Image: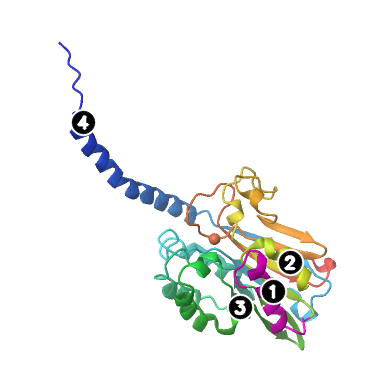
Amino acid sequence: MKVNRMMPWSERFVSLERSLHQLPFLIFGGAARAAYWLADKLVVTKIRLSFPNLPLAFDGMTITHISDIHLGPLFSLKHHFPPLLSACRELNSDLICCTGDWVDFDLDMLPEALKEFDTLRPEMGWFGILGNHDYHFNRWKLLKILRPWLKERLLINQFVRLKSGGESIDVCGLDFSVCGSRLLRGLKALELNRPDPGAFTLGLAHYPDVFDPFREMHRVDLMLTGHTHGGQICWTPLPEPPVGPVTENYKYCRGLYEVDGSWVYVSCGLGATVPIRINCPPEVTQITLSCSPSSS
Ligand SMILES: [Fe+2]
């Protein structure tokens, strides 16, 4: 006679409890696998933009734009840095700009990461700003590490005038803000710090939708941004406009936009807290500035 032996309730409970204990490990294990898989999917985007007001001395200047590194267990020095560093080395740009979210939640790996970044020596150096992860978690501790490395080029509502051949361009960086009085304070602080705007402005901001208020208060020729991770999950591949679960939340979500002669680039970024990306691969961008359409 066949007997179906049912597991006693006490054993079922122990089994369920064991499974629940394993759940975080299963989730983190899956996330780590997804993150390692993404390490090989890094794409390099190259863009050339023409600006009639770009000083001649800066014609052909190249900028490597990185964003949203989210340094942490899911964006590691061992697996994710080698492809990132080799892409940056190969691009060999004049300038490297990081538009925030240097870290995910903790700072443990940042000093070592900066040592790795030291091996990249762009002729015009680095610029950096803070993202929401840098702002909300360990801001002061992070500043203690990042400030000595970037010095005056860590732009918190500040600008630096880059000079070449008797001409100059301004690099302006906005502290992390999204909207409202905090954004307004940042824009006004920048205005006070830069009473005499230069001929050409390169803006850096983490949150892309500050592009409109930024260009309304300060003329900006090109703004580099991140934060959205390109939408992170999109049903439409590049270069089509992004369509996905969160893309409607942003006016500027992925790629290049032009408004009244000003440009904004929204990077898909490199890392993420949740390492799921569909049609939004981790990205390094190189932008070449050009003086006239004829040289494009
Ligand atoms: Fe981010």
Q: Earlier in the sequence, mark 3 or mark 4?
A: 4
- Above or below: residue 267 compared with residue 26: below
How packed mark 3 is, by other alpha carbons closer than 10 Å (few <14, some 14-19, many 20 or more), is many
**Residue 52 % position (x, y):** 84, 72
> Are the two marked residues, 1 and 2, in contact with CB atoms closer than 8 angstroms?
yes
**Residue 160 % position (x, y):** 67, 82
**263 and 291: which is toward the camera:** 263
Number of the label disc, if any, that sits on residue 9: 4
Classify mark 3: helix, strand or loop.
Answer: loop
Which label lies toward us, 3 or 2? 2
Quadrant for the C terminus in the image: bottom right
Q: Amino acid at mark 4?
A: Trp
The CA distance from mark 2 to mark 4 is: 62 Å
Tell me which segment is drawn in magenta.
175-198
Q: Amino acid at mark 3?
A: Leu
Q: Amino acid at mark 1?
A: Leu
Classify mark 2: helix, strand or loop.
Answer: helix
How packed mark 2 is, by other alpha carbons closer than 10 Å (few <14, some 14-19, many 20 or more), is few
Residue carrying label 2? 213
